[in-house]
Image (cartoon, helix red, strand yellow):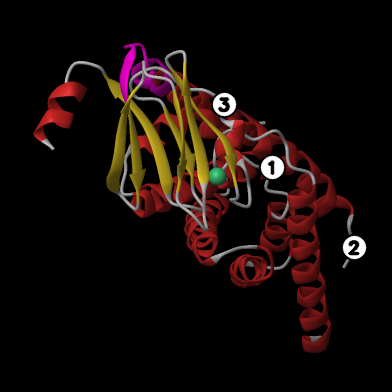
Amino acid sequence: MRKRTLDIILIAGVLLAAALLWLWLRPVEAGGSVLVIQDGQEIARYALHEDRTVTIGEADYNVLEIQNGQAAVTDANCGDHTCVRTGAVSRAGESIICLPHRLEIRIIGGADSSVDIVAQ
Amino acid sequence: MQAKKIATMGLLVALAMVLSWVEQLVPLSVTVPGVKLGLANLAVIFTLCRIGTRAAWGLSLLRVVLVSLTFGNAYSLWYSLAGALLSLVVMTLLRRTGRFSLLGISVAGAVCHNLGQIVVAAAVLGSASMVYYLPVLLVSGTAAGVCIGAVAAILVRRVRL
Ligand SMILES: [Zn+2]
């Protein structure tokens, strides 16, 4: 009986941690820019409100589609296609990750994006 | 006795390989990197409870290397290795305390497998964005751990070596 109790406490603890993290990390702010990050380096940045389709990479490719204020990976030749199944993201903090290609599509808030593009 | 133990271990490694393969054949609709059932953990938990700690570590690490060589790529080896190691450490410690049943050990193992993978993935990506996936991975790890733990409990009780 005691073992069962500890098991349940453990499971409840993990689920509680998940709930708290979810509340804490939940993306709420609307996104403004789409960052393309490969191997930890930002390689491109696009405005979320401008529709476009770009292919990232050549041999290892991911097709990034930005449409109606949402970004999605619509095609890729990675093995697992997790990035494609993630679907569209639009809020600051959300991201699409393609581990086989070490690629991250990250949405960030809108305020600073235009400034950064000018600075570059 | 020694020969029998080696044969048993060989069988368990083969079983773990088959379970990993089956898991890749049936992709759950995964939208988050790292979400999975962890079928191979059945073999690891069984070995941990019925044969011993050292055998379980050997089995798990050997499986990770073999599976990565067979189905994976250079990077998948490091994710899996990190996940497997953290999972083994925690499962071994929980078992040592003698206060958790198989279900608790299995849940902790599955969750830690996900945590280990996330840490390496964050390092490879050079990005902390993986933390946004933590809640999903904690919940999916718990669900997977409960399923695997329930089946493992039956196997540990029923299977005769
Ligand atoms: Zn991908």
Q: Is residue B60 above or below residue B128?
A: below
Q: Quadrant of ligand 1?
A: top right
Q: Quadrant of the N terminus of chain B?
A: bottom right
Depth check: B77 or B148 in front?
A: B77
- Residues drawn in magenta: A21-33
Q: Residue at x 52, y 23 (%)?
A: A88
Whether residue B144 sits left or right of residue B22 in the image: it is: left
Cα–Cα gap, marks 3 and 1: 22 Å
Q: Which residue is drawn at 56% across and 30% down?
A: A86
Depth check: B118 or B157 in front?
A: B118
Q: Locate residue A99, reporting x and y percent.
A: 49, 49
Report the amino acid beneath label 1.
Leu
Whether residue B53 sits left or right of residue B6 in the image: it is: left
Q: Does the magenta stretch include residue B30?
A: no
Q: Locate residue B128, reporting x and y percent.
A: 32, 39
Q: Which residue is drawn at 81% across and 64% down?
A: B15
Task: Tell me, yes or no, if residue B100 can be seen here.
Answer: no
Q: Locate residue B129, reporting x and y percent.
A: 36, 36
Q: Mark 1 points at which residue?
A: B37
Q: Residue B119 carries which label?
A: none
Q: Mark 2 lies on which chain?
A: B
The residue carrying pointer 3 sits among few (fewer than 14), some (14 to 19) or many (20 or more) residues within 10 Å by Cα, namely some
Q: Name the residue under label 3.
A: A87
Q: Mark 1 lies on which chain?
A: B
Depth check: B142 or B24 in front?
A: B24
SS state under label 2: loop
The residue carrying pointer 2 sits among few (fewer than 14), some (14 to 19) or many (20 or more) residues within 10 Å by Cα, namely few
SS state under label 3: loop
Q: Locate residue B149, reporting x and y percent.
A: 71, 42
Q: Mark 2 points at which residue?
A: B160
